[in-house]
Structures are given as structure tokens and as C-alpha cells.
Amino acid sequence: MRVGFLGLGNMGAPIAHNLLTADHELIVWNRSPEKAEPLRAAGAEVATVPAEAAAADVVVTMLADDAAVSAVLDGPEGLLAGGRVGIHVSMSTISVALAERLTRRHAERGESYVGAPVFGRPDAAAAGALAVLCAGPEEALATCAPLFEAIGRRTFPLGGNPADANLIKLCGNFMIMATIETLAEAMTLAEQGGVERATLLEVLTGTLFDAPVYRGYGDILVNDRFRPAGFAAPLGLKDLRLVAEAAEAHRTPLPLIGLLHDHLLSAIAIDGEDVDWSALAKSVRRAAGR
Ligand code: NAP
């Protein structure tokens, strides 16, 4: 399949590499052009503007946030100026509201729009082990199935409404952040009492908390692996905002959001913009004087 791929950051680059490895023909673009060079070397064509990717059978966007997606779609050199887009697959974690607007815009243009946010960090992307949550027109989902198989270990088809996939993704990220918070609180308590973080984690993941999210983030917290960021803290802050927007729209109080927001914001303020979102654990530790 001929695939346009826009956005070659921590997630986009390994996903695009896996599509190439699976013998898809790729035309890639990134705002900072140097990030496209490894893909050029691996056999991809490099577009100079997003519009050049419109002619592909499927165009994937994997961009930071709502503003980035709008910047890449609109304007004289944007994807939508390049002519009819067959299928737009949006993998970025974007707002439910933008997903709804994109669904309408593409439908008005006679195009298909698929929401396909993913679970998994850059290491999972590199290993082709993402979980792909996809929703959109049935025929478009069927066309994209081989692409999702090439990049993920499991695809979850979630029906015809793309925004549903985004809402599920945001619920998941909210729960990951709440998990990091509780892990950090428990580890801080254990350490204050003289028990090592690693010992606590070994017992918890070997008994009641044997889940990937506890093992993965537990390991990061035990070893203080907050740099380089697999998922940068400012993007985590963006996701908390998107969760809060969706919660307000659906009249659902989520009291933990304020706590998580302040701990993450404090970590960014004190530790820097380049830390992983799991560095919110440092805010928890500091509150106990550690
Ligand atoms: P990243 O490394 O920061 O990459 C962001 C990408 O967006 C880069 O290609 C960047 O271009 C581009 N971009 C940002 N602003 C732009 C603008 N105004 N115009 C055009 N391009 C713009 O982020 P990432 O970790 O790959 O995340 C990408 C998306 O996946 C986000 O929505 C994130 O929430 C989601 N996600 C991330 C993870 C993770 O663990 N990292 C996991 C699941 C989902 P430049 O290279 O020029 O900056």
C-alpha cells in the first residue's frame, strides 16, 4: 500500500520504519526535516510539504497535539490542499472535539477518517508491539488492517465513530497517570519507612499488581529513568487537559485530575520540560522531603 506518514517524532519514526519493513511504500514528512533522513536512507520518499502526501492510498498523522494536526492539515501547503485524501488515519492523542470536527470535515470532502490512537511507548513502537484503538468507516478499517498489524501486537476495532477511540485513549492515559501517582506515593512511604522501592515493586508486581503498567512504570520509578523522555511531560500535561475537557463536556467530575495536573506541572517547573511524564513521582517525593 502507498502510505503518507506525517510526523516523525518519538512515536512516528519507529512506526514509519515498521511500515517500510512490512513492504509498504512510504512518503514521509516532518516539520524538522532532518528527522526524515533515516527513513529516506531506509527507502522512503521524503515530501517537502504535507500536501505532497495527499495522493497516497492512506495518510497517517502522528503529531504532538490538536494544534500540530491543524497546522499540518490546513494552509496552502497542508495535507488538505493536496487534493482528495483517500483515508486519513489519525494516530495522535488529540481531543474528542477535534476528532469529531475531522470526521465531519473529511465526510464533507467525500473522504474517510479513522481515529487510531495507540497505547505503548517508543520502545513498544519500535518492537511493533503497540495496541491500536481504531474506529471509523468499516471499509476504511478493513483497508487499514494490514497497516495496524504491521505496527501493533493487537488491534481493537471500536465501531464507526472515530472519537470513541480518542475517548478510550484519554481514559487510559488518565489511568496511567493515576497509577504513576499511587506507585510514587506507595514507594515514597516504603522508603520513608526504610524499605527499598525495588523490594516493594517486586512484591506488588509478584502478587496483586501483576500488570504491564505497574511493571513498566514501577521499573522507571525504581531506577529514576526520567530522561530521556519516552513520553515528554508537557505532552502528559496536554493529555490531562484533554481529559478535563472531555470530562466537562460529559458532565463527569474527575477530582484526581487537579492533583495529577499540579504534580506534573511542578515536575516540569522544577525538573525541566524534557523529563518523562513519570517524573510526577518527583513531586510526590519532594512533598515528603525526599
Ligand atoms: P514528539 O516526539 O514530541 O513528536 C511530535 C511530532 O509532532 C514531531 O514530529 C513534531 O515535529 C510534530 N509537531 C509538533 N508541533 C507541530 C506543528 N505545529 N506543526 C507540525 N508538526 C508539529 O511526540 P511523540 O511522543 O512522538 O507523540 C506523538 C503523539 O503520540 C502525541 O499525540 C502523543 O500524545 C501520542 N503518544 C505518545 C506516546 C509516547 O509514549 N511517546 C505513546 C502513545 C501516544 P518536530 O520534529 O519538528 O518537532
Image: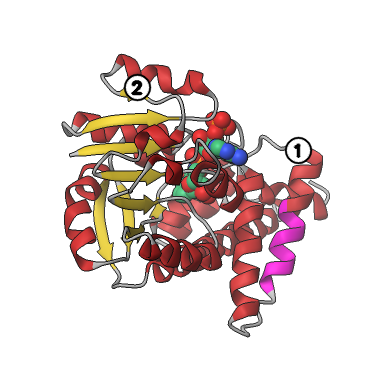
Closer to the camera in the image, 234 or 85:
85
Q: Residue 232: x and y, percent?
A: 60, 41
Front residue (pair 251, 80): 80
Specify the quadrant of the image occupied by residue 186.
Answer: bottom right
Residue at 33%, 48% in the rendered image: 84
Say if residue 288 shows up in the picture. Answer: no
Q: Say which residue appears at 61% left-offset and 49% top-offset.
A: 67
| Residue located beneath label 1 in the image | 271
First to last magenta residue range: 256-264
Q: Amino acid at mark 1?
A: Asp
Dot 2: few (<14), some (14–19), or many (≥20) neighbours within 10 Å?
many
Q: Which mark is residue 215?
A: none
Asked whether the beta carbons under mark 2 and mark 1 sit within 8 Å of each other, the answer is: no
Closer to the observer: label 2 or label 1? 2
> Where residue 39 is drawn, which disc sits there?
2
Q: Is residue 43 visible?
A: yes
Which comes before the other along the chain, label 2 or label 1? 2
